[in-house]
Amino acid sequence: MLCIMGAFLNQPNQDPMNAQEKKAIDWKSLGFEYTKTDYRFSALYENGQWSEGELSTDEFLHLHEGSPALHYAQQCFEGMKAQTSKDGRVLLFRPQMNCQRMQNTSDRLSMPRVPEELFLHGVKEAVRANINWVPPYGSGASLYIRPLLIGIGENMGLRPAKQYMFRVMVSPVGPYYKTGGLSVIKLAVSDFDRAAPHGTGDVKAGANYPGGLYATRKAQELGANEALYLDAAERRHIEEAGSANIIICTRDNKLITPRSAAILPSITRRSIMDIARQELGMETEERAIDLRAELDSFVEVAACGTAAVLSPVGKIWFDDAWHSFYGEGEEVGPVMQQLYDLLCQIQSGEKEDNFGWTMEVPM
Ligand code: PLP
Ligand code: COI
């Protein structure tokens, strides 16, 4: 039996709030934390069909104890942001790509696809209903959007769920790393692997992440912000950080990024590579990158992702030593600074979006 508890709104399309009154929050001091907002969107899948979905005020789920999401991690998620533009519009960034990635993940985890129409409707409804929680333009904060797909309902053996829930929760957030803004971070190469060569590293399965909690703690004990993973087979090639992909500007002014079937294909990374090519005229390359053999050619390194945006990497710990970029200083290099500025300007509508990447949320 499906059992979902919550105070659902019968008319999700009704404007449930006064769109003008922003919440009284010190937006500039927000970190990457959960803040309870007013509404979330949920749709259910049963007997081969998705429900229309609706908004609810209840942040709790009441799930069957046998739910495959709980036992066998039949679960996946996405991460996106909504931002307020200078002229007051609320913009999403390439949401169709998050939907596509969630569909790829669903296929890999034997879950039903959330159709694009439902995905975009759920995301827009969750943002629209929480308009007062969308940080104002210029605050440096954004509304983080977390779509979830979970296998639910009665089950015991290792098999796919018969019912699923698609849910979209949102929370206003500030910078992912505590250092804030465009701050320089440190990464420590992990003794642990994130993903196996033919495993699930290239999809956004929740199960890819808990193994990294210990690796992150170990990296933080060394003074790093996050773990950096090398390829599991040879421990030579750069894969990615715990929550972000890696981009590198080399001595010959190329922007390179690891090619690997075990890393999450980052939408931010793909966008930055396009910006580098089309706006800065840089040559870009996606290829295997041998950390030790190529380190001397790295001029600027950064982690990138929805949460991380573009976070320059000042130092990497491996082979028992810190290896620094930009000399001994902690400043941001000119290429990463330009890429960060261009990305943020496109995302916030400050720069004309020649790529057609932003999507306005109708209010
Ligand atoms: N790599 C991992 C492991 C992630 O969790 C994320 C975040 O979603 C990324 C990379 C960056 O992906 P995106 O730019 O699509 O947010
Ligand atoms: C994101 O950047 O959206 C992510 O999902 C990364 C997460 C570990 C915070």
Image (spheres, helix red, strand yellow):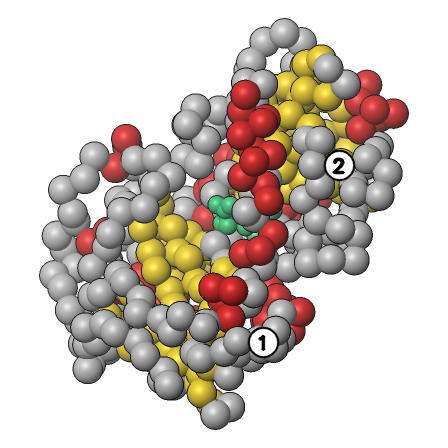
Residue at 59 percent across and 41 percent down: it is 212
Quarter of the picture containing the N terminus is: bottom left
Residue 167: image location, x then y, percent: 38, 68
Mark 2 and mark 1 residues within 8 Å of each other at the beta carbon: no
- Mark 2–mark 1 Cα distance, whole angstroms, equals 34 Å
Residue position for label 2: 230
Q: Secondary structure at mark 1?
A: loop
Camera sees residue 246: no
Most extreme residue toward the bottom is 47
Residue 206, numbered label: none
Residue at 67 percent across and 44 percent down: it is 194
Residue 156: image location, x then y, percent: 53, 76
* For residue 325, side relative to residue 258 (left or right): left
Above-or-below relation of 285 to 222? below
Q: Quadrant of residue 238?
A: top right
Q: Amino acid at mark 1?
A: Gly
* For residue 284, side relative to residue 190 (left or right): right
* For residue 107, side relative to residue 112 (left or right): right
Above-or-below relation of 34 to 40? above
* 352 or 167, nearer to the observer: 167
Above-or-below relation of 173 to 48? above
Residue at 27 percent across and 47 percent down: it is 35
Q: Secondary structure at mark 2?
A: strand
Classed neighbour count for the residue bearing mark 1: other residues with Cα under 10 Å, few (<14), some (14–19), many (≥20) = few
Residue at 44 percent across and 36 percent down: it is 176
Residue position for label 1: 157
Residue 241: image location, x then y, percent: 63, 37
Q: Amino acid at mark 2?
A: Leu
